Image: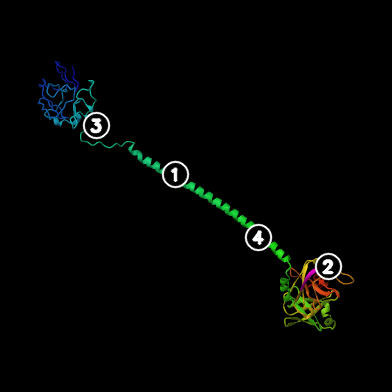
Amino acid sequence: MPTQPGVPFPPGAPAQAQPGVQPAGPFPPAGPVPARPGVPFQPGGPAQAQPGAAFPPGGPAQAAGPFHSAGPVPAQPGAPASAVPAAADPVGATHYGPAGAPASGAAGPYAPNGSLPPAGPTWAGGVGAYPGQPVPPPTGPRRRRWPSVVAALVVLALAGLAGFQAYQIDRLTGRLAGTERQLAEAQGDDRARLDGLEQRAEALEKQAGATFNPEAVAGAVLPSVFRVRAGQFTGTAFAIGEPAAGGGTNLFTNFHVVEAVWEAGDREVFLERTDQRFPATIVKVDKTNDVAHLRTTGRFTGLTAASEAVKSGQQIVVVGAPLGLEDSVTTGVVSAFRDARDGSGPVIQFDAPINPGNSGGPVVNGSKQVVGIATAKARDAEGIGLAVPIEIACDGFKIC
């Protein structure tokens, strides 16, 4: 009957020789089993009991009785038992941990159910590890997984930050667009208000122009009005239009004011104003319309002729030197516009008081424009004055 490693011979059965193994003869008498873990039995030597050594329960060998061997152990001739390499440790040998208990749950040469123990030595450090050898740390996929987790967390954090920044930028863009829209609306409102103010200013200017202000009219007209002395007679003359050709100033007066000088063949008259005297020349006369054109070498501001015909009720200012009293101002309204009759030209009738010496003076409207040349007044009546329309004088002499 062949023997199996780690299986004792049954009682009374002769031992079968193993190939290549010399029989050791009869077993020695029962004796104590050495309790050093991991040391195989030495055939032929007495086994010494170790204090505190415990055998696994259920094993065939007891500390104080006969025992069965674990089977033949091949040994090198002359080699001590301690020289046997760890890889040649006999199968079924029980190894004990530091406290004397079987390592990894080993129960001796027999398994609990009588089957063979698992192949290979079992050490206290684990399957396949030798006593005293450190167990290497695990190097599986779980240890190498943390860089991927960290990278994923970093990517998620960056993505969240980018999304938050995009949200903030979108909010700022919306607020900026809203501010620009409000600014454009405010500018539109301001522009509308400005247009409204300009229109109101223009309307006020028109109203101011329409409002009659004799003081303002007199202040603008008086510097251009003179007392004219022609021989023994005096009257009034005023500057008109642009400066004369070759320098100087053009003036209008009545023909009957300078008639005596003209008829005498003389052409020189004098302009007087505030103790100053300027010589002037009679250039041309219109006896039919009672108008004379004068010219002086002095430079004075010319008045502007009205471009529109007068209307009844229009307010006027008459400036002149009645009875030689220069810079006299009277006011009134246009009573009527009379057409030409009985060989005389059209005239403007007004109610402003005039007297001898006013002849040749300007009749001015509220816009400081000359509408006529004062010529005469009705005898034995008050408030009836007559003026030559300015357009007749301008058309006849072409100096306005």
Where is residue 221? Give x, y as percent.
Answer: 73, 73
The residue carrying pointer 3 sits among few (fewer than 14), some (14 to 19) or many (20 or more) residues within 10 Å by Cα, namely few
Quadrant containing the N terminus is top left
Q: Against 233, is 8 above or below?
A: above
Q: Say which of 242 and 190 sits in front.
A: 190
**Quadrant in which the C terminus appears:** bottom right
Residue 179 picture location, percent across and down: 55, 52
Residue at figure coordinates x 57%, y 52% from the top left? 182
Type of residue at label 1?
Gly
Circle 3 residue = 126
**Distance between the Cα atoms at labels 1 and 3?**
48 Å
Residue 304: x and y in percent read: 75, 71
Label placed on residue 386: none
**Circle 4 crowding by C-alpha within 10 Å: few under 14, some 14–19, many from 20:** few
Q: Which residue is mark 4?
A: 197
Q: Residues within 10 Å of mark 2 (few under 14, many from 20)?
A: some
Instruction: Tell whether position 194 is magenta.
Output: no
Residue named by callout 2: 337
**Which one is nearer the viewer's eye here, 91 or 383?**
383
